[in-house]
Amino acid sequence: MSDDTRNPTRQRPLEVACPQCRTRVVWSTDNPYRPFCSKRCRLLDLGAWADESHRIAGEPAMDEADLDALIDRLERGGDNR
Ligand SMILES: [Zn+2]
């Protein structure tokens, strides 16, 4: 007799694919950047949106140097100390 359904309520973590880099990430409240895998990917996505108006469609949204600058700016932005 098979008894492999004896634990039907066992929770499996919900995984989603990061919209930016396709990394599988666990959707949990521990991840403030969900559905992205990281802050970097989240900012990349925001940057892509923000950049859209003055970019030619089809170009890469942002390169590494631009991203680092953006992160730097956002982390300081609005909090002038
Ligand atoms: Zn990612």
Image: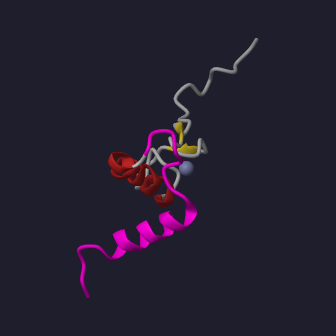
Q: Is residue 58 visible?
A: yes
Q: Residue furthest right?
A: 1
Rendered-image quadrant of the C terminus = bottom left
Q: Is residue 51 above or below residue 66?
A: above
Q: Residue at x 40, y 54 (%)?
A: 47
Residue 31 lies in quadrant: bottom left
Q: Residue furthest top?
A: 1
Q: How is the image coloured?
A: secondary structure
Magenta span includes 58: yes
Q: Is residue 30 visible?
A: no
Rendered-image quadrant of the N terminus = top right
Q: Is residue 72 above or below residue 53?
A: below
Magenta span includes 18: no
Q: Which region of the structure is painted magenta?
A: 56-81
Q: Residue 12 location in percent, x, y?
A: 56, 36
| Total numbered circles | 0
Q: Residue at x 37, y 72 (%)?
A: 73
Q: Residue furthest bottom?
A: 81
Taking the image as shown, residue 10 lies to the left or right of residue 72, namely right
Looking at the picture, tell me which residue is in the foreground, 67 or 32: 67
Looking at the picture, tell me which residue is in the foreground, 46 or 6: 46
Q: Residue at x 69, y 21 (%)?
A: 4
Q: Residue at x 56, y 63 (%)?
A: 64
Q: Residue 39 location in percent, x, y?
A: 46, 59
Q: Residue 29 location in percent, x, y?
A: 41, 51
Q: Is residue 41 above or below residue 3?
A: below
Looking at the picture, tell me which residue is in the foreground, 76 or 7: 76
Q: Residue 51 location in percent, x, y?
A: 37, 52
